[in-house]
Amino acid sequence: MPKTILNYVQPHKPLLCFMPNTSTLLFLLITFPMLSCQTGNPEKKDELIRINHIRAPSPDGSSLPYLTRGEDGYTYMSWTEELDSGLTILKYSKLEKNEWSVPELIISGNDWFTNWADYPMIAIDAHGNMIANFLAKSTSGTYSYDVNVVLKSANSNKWSNPIIPHKDGTPTEHGFVTMLPRNDGTFLLAWLDGRNTGATQNGEMTIRSAIIDMEGNLSKEVELDNQVCDCCQTGGVQTSTGSLISYRDRSVFEVRDVSIVRGNNGKWTAPEIVHNDNWKIKGCPVNGPRMDAIGNAVSIAWFTAANGVPKVRFAFSDDAAKTFRKPLEIANTYTLGRVDVAMVDNYSAYVSWLGSSDSTSMIMLRKVNVNGDLEDPIAIAETSALRASGFPQMVNSGKQLILTWTDVQRDKHEIKMATVSLPPN
């Protein structure tokens, strides 16, 4: 499909002003100014927030956490546990009344392809129907594996048998899944599909999508883009007017900027580049975009290193991603990317990323407003830049942000978690 660059609209003042509440509480403010050359609005005081480090519901030795807020209003976390026998276990827990539920088994297997960047996920619709995904080897080849999904309806306590949403049957790479609940008893799936990359095809990685219902029936499989980056995460959101899928694109000139496609009633737009970073790189940076949405208000964050300068960028849209405001630089120079984003309301969002200096790496957080105001960056926790540390996750649970990540210490690892208070508007 031809790829175009989205038009931009000029930013305007938000309709709602935010004033932080700092009374009677003990707040912790940790700033890490060396990680960004931007200081935000000089006329605005630093916002004070409270950070609590809490125990995750996963046992020691767990990894690959994923956080999501279901359409049912609850926050969920999934993770993996690997046993000495080679068995990999996928579990989840649900946050209810500030307590994580007893972990529940989703599925396990000894033929999985486990990867620091391509981790299992779960999604939940407004009725409590659930879907989860994992990768399983299709042959003995190093990079031949399939997307597998399992389903559990709200009125059942059993997960379905695994279902492969792509039917090409090629021993190639399939992964980096996005799953979006459609609240009609179906889920939208999108994934990177390597069916054209085999030894005989010698083609390019593609991105495809399909719809799956709670009986496991597949429909409307379609190719969204015929040439994309090989191993960056995909992202997506449901807006009031349809579905959005974001991913790292790839041109014939090896430009790997972020694109989106918009879907409605089974029809998809041609790919559109969110911003012309013009990042030319002959290889996959393993750094995909992240999105969040409230109604038709959409936010997207991504990593780029165009011209050799690493940056985290962010853009707002108030028309379901038909247009985006001019991108903002959330972090520059000292960043490894690995971004996430969580909207607070139609006019503000938080962006997280992995910051790095010569001696340490930090999970960073920064608030941005629709008019372009940037709060000072906040350091949440020190972590490792190793691949084993994975991609920090973040979700707005309603009254607070929840962040989780894999902490790597020598030959041990565990999932850690922190909450960040959201002062009332």
Image (cartoon, rainbow, N blue to C red):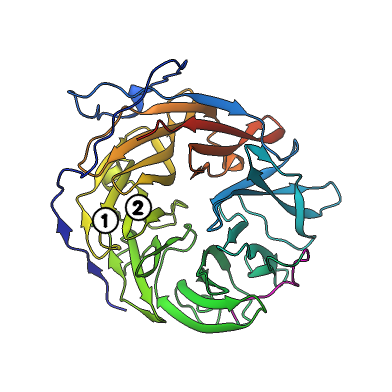
Q: Position of residue 92 (x, y in %)?
A: 69, 51
Amino acid type, callout 1: Ser
- Residue 300 disc label: 2
Mark found first going from the N terminus, 1 or 2: 2
Nearer to me, 195 or 203: 195
Q: Are marks 1 and 2 in contact (CB under 8 Å)?
A: yes
* Residue bounds of the magenta highlight: 157-166
- The residue under the point 58% across, 38% down is 405
Quadrant (top left/top right/bottom left/bottom right) for the C terminus: top left
Q: Quadrant of residue 332?
A: top left
- The residue under the point 24% across, 29% down is 40
- The residue under the point 46% across, 72% down is 207
Quadrant (top left/top right/bottom left/bottom right) for the N terminus: bottom left
Q: Secondary structure at mark 2?
A: strand
Q: Quick check: 39 left or right of 174? A: left
In the rendered view, tell whether residue 8 sits above or below residue 347: below
Q: Position of residue 347 (x, y in %)?
A: 28, 45
Q: Quick check: 374 left or right of 100? A: left
Amino acid type, callout 2: Ile
Q: Quadrant of residue 48?
A: top left
Q: Which residue is mark 1?
A: 317
In the rendered view, tell whether residue 85 sits above or below residue 37: below
Nearer to me, 179 or 108: 179
Q: Quick check: 191 left or right of 318? A: right
Q: Position of residue 51 (x, y in %)?
A: 50, 25
